[in-house]
């Protein structure tokens, strides 16, 4: 195995909600024992790396806090490369924390950016204010394009929809399948695409993002996508396994 870096999705690959997928703990231990640089990459922006570390620990997996990279972190990294320093944010504390850390002012007064993440506290006035700012020239940025989570919980893409319809402007989605988040993750782990693998359960997000960023891709069948879905795509994963427990590339 000439690859020295591994980017791994979380939900549908390592965990189902907070329950361990059988064999995922042994897979993580095996990867770490072989001194492979491992980073867990998630589109979900509402948990900090410490939150995710605790979630893993509760499922029986011990990894350092530095092993996690989220779409909230990637969004902050993206905005640091843009012009502007003020953001109106629809999202939870983890996203706001990352933007504060990156030096942004969170405000509802003449923001340079409207940033949408995941939140259960979404209301008419947020939609109206965000749409007004975007219509007035603020850049429209979203952490991820996912429309829903388990049990049809509305996700970021769904929260962006009314703002998009009202303004006629589409957000820039930072998260998978954008190659941006994969490139940002590579920078975060000081790795290069040519010697990095990505493992995911979703052809339309994880595998497409990896493909667009030039990584070798592994699809596991414990989450969203199944074998029958592969032929529906114009691209193919290089490897397909029933679960991470069956991966024999390491």
Image: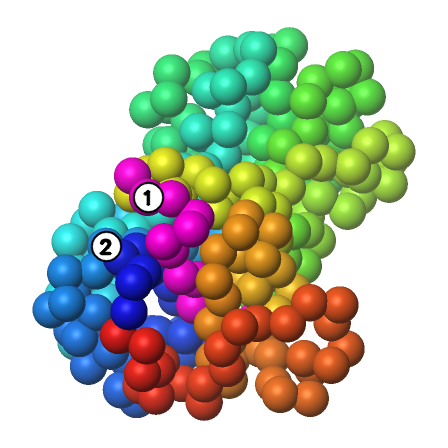
User: Is 124 left or right of 237, judged from the image as shown?
Assistant: right
Residue at position x 64%, y 10% in the image:
110
Q: Secondary structure at mark 2?
A: strand
Name the foreground residue: 66 vs 128: 66
For disc 1, the marked residue is: 191
Disc 2 crowd, CA 10 A, few/some/many (<14, 14-19, 20+): some
State how far apart marks 2 and 1 are (Cα): 8 Å
- Compared to 240, does 44 lie above or below? above
Is residue 31 visible in the rendered structure shown here?
yes
Residue at position x 77%, y 77% in the image:
232
Disc 1 crowd, CA 10 A, few/some/many (<14, 14-19, 20+): some
Where's residue 86, x and y in %? 53, 14
Where's residue 128, x and y in %? 76, 31
Residue 99 falls within the magenta-colored stretch: no
Residue 200 falls within the magenta-colored stretch: yes
Q: Residue furthest front?
A: 2
């Amino acid at each position: 195995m000439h690859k020295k870096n591994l980017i791994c999705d979380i939900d549908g690959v390592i965990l189902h909600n907070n329950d361990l997928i059988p064999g995922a703990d042994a897979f993580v231990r095996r990867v770490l024992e072989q001194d492979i640089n491992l980073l867990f990459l998630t589109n979900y922006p509402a948990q900090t790396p410490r939150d995710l570390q605790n979630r893993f620990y509760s499922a029986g997996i011990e990894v350092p806090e530095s092993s996690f990279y989220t779409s909230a972190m990637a969004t902050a990294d993206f905005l640091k490369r843009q012009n502007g320093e003020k953001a109106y944010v629809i999202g939870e504390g983890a996203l706001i924390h990352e933007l504060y850390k990156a030096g942004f002012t969170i405000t509802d007064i003449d923001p340079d950016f409207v940033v949408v993440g995941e939140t259960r506290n979404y209301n008419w006035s947020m939609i109206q204010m965000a749409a007004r700012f975007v219509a007035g020239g603020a850049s429209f940025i979203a952490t991820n394009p996912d429309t829903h989570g388990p049990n049809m919980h509305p996700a970021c893409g769904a929260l962006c929809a009314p703002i998009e319809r009202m303004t006629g402007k589409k957000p820039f989605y930072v998260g998978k399948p954008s190659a941006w988040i994969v490139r940002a993750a590579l920078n975060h782990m000081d790795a290069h695409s040519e010697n990095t693998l990505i493992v995911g359960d979703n052809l339309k997000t994880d595998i497409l993002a990896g493909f667009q960023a030039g990584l070798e891709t592994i699809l596991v069948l414990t989450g969203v996508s199944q074998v029958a879905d592969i032929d529906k795509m114009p691209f193919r994963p290089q490897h397909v396994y029933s679960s991470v427990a069956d991966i024999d590339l390491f």
